[in-house]
């Protein structure tokens, strides 16, 4: 299990999956940002032509049973050795989270 999987699993133990989560991000803006910033390392959408083979596919992240808005927020705000040092604004973070969560049931 990769780092993301362990982080999501750890968060799921401490959080109830039934907790209400208010999503404030714009998934369309998140999709655009993901294509601009994240697609160099991740497959961010099903129409992406090239798999960079570096990070997990966004759909796999979304489909993980413990993925929530909170687990994504914690992950995005925590430095990771394998990821570039991205500094996202709070709005960009909300938008990326909203986009990833739209992939949850695809």
Image: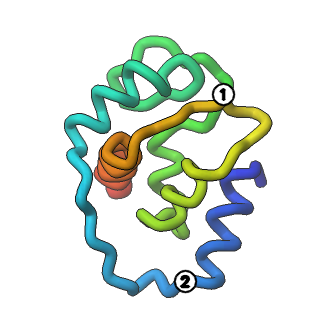
Q: Which mark is residue 9?
A: none
For the residue pair 17 and 71, the one nearer the viewer reads as 71
Q: How far across and how far down the image is residue 8, in percent? A: 62, 64
Q: CA distance from mark 1 to mark 2?
A: 28 Å
For the residue pair 42 and 32, the one nearer the viewer reads as 32
Spot the residue most to the top: 50
For mark 1, what is the residue?
84
- Circle 1: is it few (<14), some (14-19), or many (20+) Cα within 10 Å? few
Point 46% across, 81% down: residue:
17
Residue 6 left/right relative to 35: right
Q: Is residue 106 visible?
A: no
- Secondary structure type for disc 1: loop
For the residue pair 15 and 93, the one nearer the viewer reads as 93
Point 53% across, 64% down: residue:
71
- Circle 2: is it few (<14), some (14-19), or many (20+) Cα within 10 Å? some
Q: For the residues carrying marks 1 and 2, which lies nearer the camera in this image?
A: 1
Whichever of labels 1 and 2 marks the residue nearer the N terminus, that label is 2
Compared with 9, 3 (above or below) is above
Compared with 2, 8 (above or below) is below
Q: How far across and how far down the image is residue 60, in percent? A: 52, 46
Instruction: Locate the N terminus by quadrant.
Output: bottom right
Residue 9 left/right relative to 38: right
Q: How far across and how far down the image is residue 27, in percent? A: 24, 44
Compared with 1, 34 (above or below) is above
Q: Is residue 63 visible?
A: yes
Q: How far across and how far down the image is residue 13, in percent? A: 65, 82
For mark 2, what is the residue?
15
Point 42% across, 63% down: residue:
69
Among the 4 quarters of the image, the one containing residue 105 = bottom left
Point 47% across, 67% down: residue:
70
For the residue pair 28 and 87, the one nearer the viewer reads as 87
């Amino acid at each position: 299990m990769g780092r993301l999987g362990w982080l999501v699993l750890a968060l799921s133990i401490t959080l109830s999956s039934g907790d209400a989560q208010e999503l404030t991000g714009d998934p369309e803006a998140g999709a655009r940002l993901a294509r601009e910033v994240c697609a160099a390392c991740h497959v961010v959408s099903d129409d992406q032509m090239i798999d960079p083979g570096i990070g997990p596919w966004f759909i796999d992240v979304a489909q993980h049973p413990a993925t929530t808005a909170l687990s994504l927020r914690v992950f995005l705000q925590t430095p990771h050795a394998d990821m570039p040092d991205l500094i996202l604004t709070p709005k960009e973070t909300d938008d990326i989270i909203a986009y990833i969560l739209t992939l949850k049931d695809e």
